[in-house]
Amino acid sequence: MDFNFTDDQDQLRDAVRKWVDKGYDFERRRAIVKAGGFDRGVYGELAELGLAGLYISEDHGGMGMGPVEGMVVMEELGRGIVLEPLGQTLIASGIIGGYAPDAVKSAWLPKIASGEALVVLAHTERAARYKLDVCETRAGRSGEAWSITGAKSTVPAGDQAEAFLVPALADGKMALFLVERSAAGVQARGYGTMEGGRAAEVTFASSPATLVSQDGLAALEHAVDIGIAASCAEAVGVLDKTMDVTAEYLNTRKQFGVPLATFQALRHRMADMKMQQELARSMSYYASLKLNAPPEERRRAMARAKYQLGVSMRFVGQNSVQLHGGIGVTDEYIGSHYFKKLTQLELSFGDTLHHLGEVSARMQETAGVFA
């Protein structure tokens, strides 16, 4: 199998990396955190690069690219621990493009591609505990008009988004709807998140909704799998920078008159971290390559990838803090922000223990080795 990137993919990576290096330094990120964790201007810059339209066809103003390009972009955004939720845009554009009626595609995809509209997935409920088929939000129908009533938690940038993708039960079966934040009965209470980003608790009270898919569970599973692949790629970028800042610290910090990097025990620790970093990278590639596979194969692959990424994130993040000592958890040092981002990503779209259970439940007679 050829794991080399094409020239177009390398150029895309270079463009995003240059923007991160020049346009999203640590001080700008710190200012965004203080301002609430989301900057519409930054999101507009991402859209100007074409990233909001990455998964959108050229007919609707997008770039018409696929999962590997999405992985490349998310890795670079992870290196800059960018707060603006481009991964949510990939989810929304992928699901609307793949499941919604033509009228919904024509109305929303051009606005998403241009950055005019941020659409995010609002699926988490307090009683669900990562289980996608647990849903208390209800949808009602009057003629051709739909409305939904319920509540969703930890919705990324929920008080800043223009619309939400919302799973809800319609006649006892889950369907997927699009609800505008400006619609009647919608309330979003925003707050800052642990790693510096922004989320919201969103409630719907007979709020007007547009049907995206009657087969809501299949669409929701696909949406979450796009999110898992994006978060895995983002985590690889964060791991790369975590390793960089840790190696730099060990090479400059001295103990007994010599750099810490000369101590064999610490070098062995870094070698173990490097192994976990590369395991994470390979499983992120695996997740992206399986994103368009048949549903059962795709779901199995995402669980495996997210489990390994969770193990790697925890190992590298915790060891980085230990190798730094006290400075590793100070707000003034960038390493602590990489650690917090790794912690947040480990919990996104199902934590490590949840996906270990998913891997076990989906295991076949081959134990997954040849499947």
Image: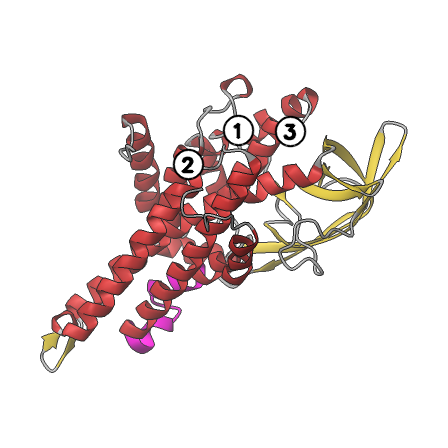
Residue 369 vs residue 150: left or right?
left
Earlier residue among tags 2 and 1: 1
Q: Any magenta on residue 337? A: yes
- Give the residue at mark 1: 114
Residue 202 vs residue 71: left or right?
right
- Residue at horizontal 70 percent and vertical 60 percent from the top: 126
Quadrant assignment for the C terminus: top left
Where's residue 312, x and y in %? 37, 59
Q: Is residue 257 visible?
A: yes
Q: CA distance from mark 2 to mark 1?
A: 27 Å
Q: Main secondary structure of the magenta part?
A: helix
Camera-side residue of 236 and 333: 236
Q: Assign a secondary structure to mark 2.
A: helix
Earlier residue among tags 3 and 2: 3
Which residues, given as a range, are shown in magenta? 324-341
Where's residue 149, x and y in %? 82, 47
- Give the residue at mark 2: 289
Residue 148 position by quadrant: top right
Residue 99: mark: 3
Residue 157: mark: none
Q: Assign a secondary structure to mark 3.
A: helix
- 201 in relation to 67, above or below: below
Where's residue 65, x and y in %? 44, 27
Residue 253 vs residue 10: left or right?
left
* Mark 1 residue type: Ser
Where's residue 122, x and y in %? 66, 47
Quadrant assignment for the N terminus: top left
- 103 in relation to 316, above or below: above
- Residue at horizontal 49 percent and vertical 19 percent from the top: 58
- Residue at horizontal 73 percent and vertical 40 percent from the top: 182
Q: Is residue 40 visible?
A: no
